[in-house]
Amino acid sequence: MLSFQPKSVTKDLLSGLPERSRRVLTDRFGLAGKGERRTLDAIGQEYGITRERIRQIENHSISAVRDSDAYAALTQHWENLKAAITALGGVLSEETILQELAKNDADRNHVVFLLTVGHHFEDRREDNDFRARWHIDEQLAEQIEAALSSLYESIEPNKLTPEEEFLEIFARHLKQAGVKNRSNDALPRWLLISKRIGRNPLGEWGRQDSPHVRIKNTRDFAYLTLKRHGSPMHFTEVAKNIEKLFGRKTHPATTHNELIKDGRFVLVGRGLYALKEWGYEPGVVRDVIAGILQREGPLTREEIVERVKRERYVKDATIAVNLQNGMFVRNPEGKYSLAK
């Protein structure tokens, strides 16, 4: 997307600076060697001066670059960089810019340096809500951040939304924030500016702090696997599908242990698990019967069997045996209720 080599442009911009100024910028931005960026303190110790003095040299050197003949001679390159960022959305996280515009790792620090010295570009530092980002339009940056904040507030804590639907919701928040002209391609990049909104490995969006988005362990992978499947699964199948969907090898016994520990899952048969959010209640068969009777009142044996089998993969005889438990009584009409 860039018509020039960032490293070559950096070399031209630094060439006219005094040796110490050139060294300070090179060290601060990691423009040489392995690309390691040095702190103000580390550079100050090398020169025997304070970190504040190094900061002053850095700021003065950046100003000198902007005022140089070399900078003025690169008008075409600055316009090319501006056009590239505009095409990507005009407001982008620093990481997105580097992924899109840096052809290799060696170019990354040079692109950041060019953004820093280029007068077209303004940065916003990372904070609690947003990643480090750059923009070429202050008003658009404000509007996008407002839209991202209102979008976050509208998301239910543990809800997941498919990407296409989520982008439509985001588009409405952008419109409310005053963003009129936008490219659909820019929306996913703008979402990446937020630290509070995220996407899981299945491409579903939600709050970043949700265990359904920030996947940490086998339980979270199991949740996504069951949710994608849409119906109860045996724990061995859950383990197989975790590997199939995510490329993460998981032992069936480990998967079983994790499912048992997590309240999001309900054992509904021999080794069969479902998600509690589907309406399944935890507990053994007698607990399920008790819950049904508590909600619906007295029911016949046939009615109880039909309702229990919505929640458990068990035989009719198993349900009948549990009805003999002292928790339940049968009235003269043949209906069962909870014993008092």
Image (cartoon, helix red, strand yellow):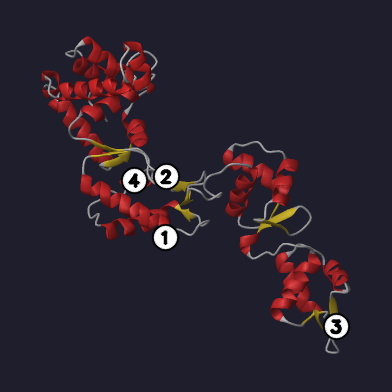
> Which comes sooner in the sequence, label 4 or label 2?
4
For residue 83, above or below residue 76: below
For the residues carrying marks 1 and 4, which lies nearer the camera in this image?
A: 1
For the residues carrying marks 3 and 2, which lies nearer the camera in this image?
A: 2
Secondary structure of the residue carrying tag 4 is: helix
For residue 19, above or below residue 120: above
Q: Are marks 3 and 2 in contact (CB under 8 Å)?
A: no
Secondary structure of the residue carrying tag 3 is: strand
- The numbered dot on residue 190 is 4
> Which comes sooner in the sequence, label 3 or label 4?
4
- The numbered dot on residue 195 is 2
> Which comes sooner in the sequence, label 1 or label 4?
1
Look at the image and tell me whether residue 2 can be seen.
no
Residue indicated by mark 3: 330
User: Amino acid type of disc 1?
Assistant: Ser
- Estimate the x, y position of residue 218 in percent, counting from the top left: 64, 43
Look at the image and tell me whether residue 302 can be seen.
yes
Q: Residues within 10 Å of mark 2 (few under 14, many from 20)?
A: some
Residue drawn at the location 70% of the way across and 44% of the way down:
255
Q: CA distance from mark 1 to mark 2?
A: 15 Å
Q: Residues within 10 Å of mark 1 (few under 14, many from 20)?
A: few
Q: Are marks 3 and 1 in contact (CB under 8 Å)?
A: no
Residue drawn at the location 67% of the way across and 47% of the way down:
238
- What is the quadrant of the N terminus in the image? top left
Residue indicated by mark 1: 154
User: Amino acid type of disc 2?
Assistant: Lys
